[in-house]
Amino acid sequence: MTTTRFAPSPTGYIHVGNLRTALMNYLIARKAGGTFILRIDDTDPERSKEEYVDAIKQDLEWLGLHWDKVERQSERLDRYAEAADKLRDMGRFYEAFETPTELDLKRKKQLNMGKPPVYDRAALNLSEAEKEALRAERGNGVWRFKLDHQRIEWTDGILGDISIDAASVSDPVLIRGDGQVLYTIASVVDDTEMGVTDVVRGSDHVTNTATQIQIIEALGGTCPRFAHHSLLTGPQGEALSKRLGTLALRDLREQGVQPMALLSLMARLGSSDPVELRADMAELIDGFDVTRFGAAPTKFDVQDLFPLTAKHLQSLPLADVADAVADAGVPADLAAPFWAMARENITTLNDLKGWWELCRDGAEPLIADEDRDFIAQAMGLLPEGPFDGDTWGAWTGAVKEATGRKGKGLFMPLRKALTGMERGPEMAALLPLLQVIRARG
Ligand code: GLU
């Protein structure tokens, strides 16, 4: 059975980059009728925070990316210790004692000699006595996985055939000196034991994947299918990593971005299929194909989310936005005509309040000197209430007859006098909502 996972580290809020990973894994699982696991990668007790675990769940729920199971790495440490023992018994695990400064120096030397900065395995030559002495002096060493120096190959769901020379990669550290288990092994143990069949993640993980394939094989597991999506850049192709902090999902929510707009964009951005606004999750699932994505960096412009949000909102019946309409202050008896008027004129639901304030308080009239008499005359012709969708037509008909004005010369001064703006909602829809005018009815 298809099983995927989204595996964030709870060290911050999730952003658009994380969402891409989450969504792809979610859609693969749902399309196949499989299982989607939310895995919290919290082996780092200092940086992992419960507050972020809660925030990640809230953000995924807001988007409707429901998970079937939650797993927490911090609750599985004994499983990782067992796997580590196994690697140790197999002779694929060794303790190394270099300090970060020493490693840095080695790397610099290698680079100066035009060699790739790969860990030289000096620790493999240490005798037991030397290790004992180093332990006494520096504390426990780190544990490195001894890679098999062969080519590591896989067919990537996005990148195609990949081949990496293991000799060009440093033996990965899987356990730190203080005993903390690192992601590289924890993830392998989880993917194997949880039956994960498909792993989609960012292309920054390609080297990890190479080493993880060898660890999985050493532990006797089955490799999932891997796919590595490109990383997002800003609209000009600039690195987004520094700005991702400002592209947290909760910030986008605050700015009024609608989940369907965000999901529709992310399910297609960087693929060879066009971005289309989808009505619901079923359509997203149906239209998703991970093999359509390309390896090139993907340009993301936050501004693209707003026209999609506006379009999505236009399609919604009142029932779907009733809370937001009420929150904007609109009385229940006006909610339906208000929404019918407003939905054509908003970008996000955050704009509702402004339109309601215009209806409730009126606007500073915009009246040109030459229109003063005309407006006074028109106001005198305003019919008795109650107002409805036909009132505007009847009124402007009467004004036209009385003044001889027509077209723009008739409508524009009335619009500006009533709304203070040259552009805006259909006046026929707006007029019955203007409270001062209603009061005359
Ligand atoms: N916690 C890892 C990350 O956020 C997970 C990577 C993976 O999907 O394996 O980068």
Image (tube, grey):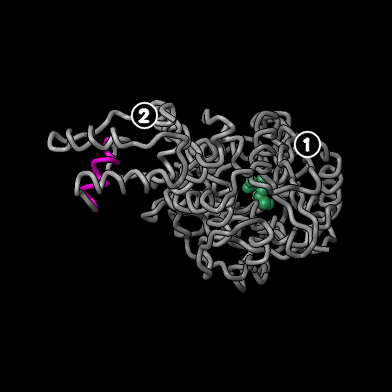
Q: What number is the disc on residue 395? A: none
Q: Start and end of the magenta stretch?
A: 407-417
| Front residue (pair 401, 236) | 401
The quadrant in which residue 213 appears is bottom right
Q: Position of residue 425 (x, y in %)?
A: 39, 45
As drawn, is 189 to the left or to the right of 199?
Answer: right
Q: Nearer the viewer, mark 2 or mark 1?
A: 2
Which residue carries the number 1 mark? 74
> What distance separates the C-alpha of mark 2 from that of mark 1?
58 Å
Question: Which image quadrant is residue 114 in?
Answer: bottom left
Q: Is residue 281 above or below residue 367?
A: below
- Evaluate whether residue 172 shows in this view: no
Q: Nearer the viewer, residue 224 or 286?
A: 286
State whether label 2 is within 8 Å of ligand 1. Answer: no
Q: Quadrant of residue 13?
A: top right
Label annotation for residue 362: 2
Q: Within 10 Å of the Cα at label 1, are there few (<14), some (14-19), or many (20+) other Cα atoms?
A: some
Residue in the picture at 79% in, 43% down: 70
Under tag 2, what secondary structure? loop
* Amino acid type of the residue tagged 2 in the rendering: Gly
Q: Quadrant of the C terminus?
A: top left
Q: Residue at x 20, y 48 (%)?
A: 405
Circles 2 and 1, Cβ within 8 Å, touching? The answer is no
Residue 147 at x, y = what percent?
70, 59
In the picture, the quarter occupied by the N terminus is bottom right
Q: Residue at x 66, y 53 (%)?
A: 171
Main SS category, magenta section: helix
- Answer whether residue 176 is magenta in the image: no
Residue 140: x and y in percent read 73, 34
